[in-house]
Image (cartoon, rainbow, N blue to C red):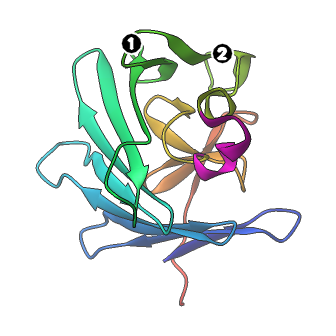
Amino acid sequence: MVRGVNEAGEASVYAFSGLGVLVASERRGVRRDYVTDLTSECRRVLMEIDDELTVRYTYGVVRNSVNIAPTAGSGESVLHMHLHTDRLGSTRFATHGSGAVLGWVSYDAWGSRTGGVDMAVAVLGGDAPILRGIVLQNYTGHRFDDVLGLYFAQARMYDPVTRQKEMLYFTEK
């Protein structure tokens, strides 16, 4: 288990399997469990499950499909969208199945946002906090931890402001 705390005392906690694969996280009181593809080289997340939503990912060459549905609901999709990435794997924009652009973002060379709209807000409006940390805002394919203000890059946290990676240290539960 890895834990980080910001200046306000809020914590982000990450739990790993014996193989070093992310299996769960908790931020702002929301626990999220992960199903990971152990056969892929970069161990991509296939599914995220929390109390409210189940998110399924399908990976492609130039875009990734995301299907978001209620966890305990009817199973009907709340939202189906495509995340379009650049050659570094950074998500640049999200489109609806119809092709309409839902949101976009641009980064400088070190991962700091330089423009765009908050894709979580653009996609779900007032319910955007539900989506934070899913994969709507990521740089080089890494997840952004909105509590710590860092990118979660598996065994390291990346700070786009200082342009440095910091090691995560395991703690007792």
The residue pinned by badge 1 equals 98
Percent position of residue 115, x then y? 73, 14
Assign a secondary structure to mark 1: loop
The residue pinned by badge 2 equals 108
- Disc 2 to disc 1, how far (Cα)? 29 Å
Identify the residue at the far left of this view.
Answer: 39
Which is more toward the observer, 118 or 92?
118
Q: Which part of the image, by quadrant, shows the C terminus?
A: bottom right
Image quadrant in which you'd find residue 103: top right
Identify the residue at the far front of this view.
Answer: 74
Going by the numbered disc 2, the residue's amino acid type is Asp
Percent position of residue 106, x then y? 63, 14
**Residue 127 part of the magenta segment:** yes
Q: Which residues are magenta?
A: 124-131
What residue do we see at 63% from left, 24% from top?
A: 110
What residue do we see at 31% from left, 66% from top?
A: 20
How many numbered badges does the structure rendering display? 2
Going by the numbered disc 1, the residue's amino acid type is Ser
Magenta highlight: main SS: helix
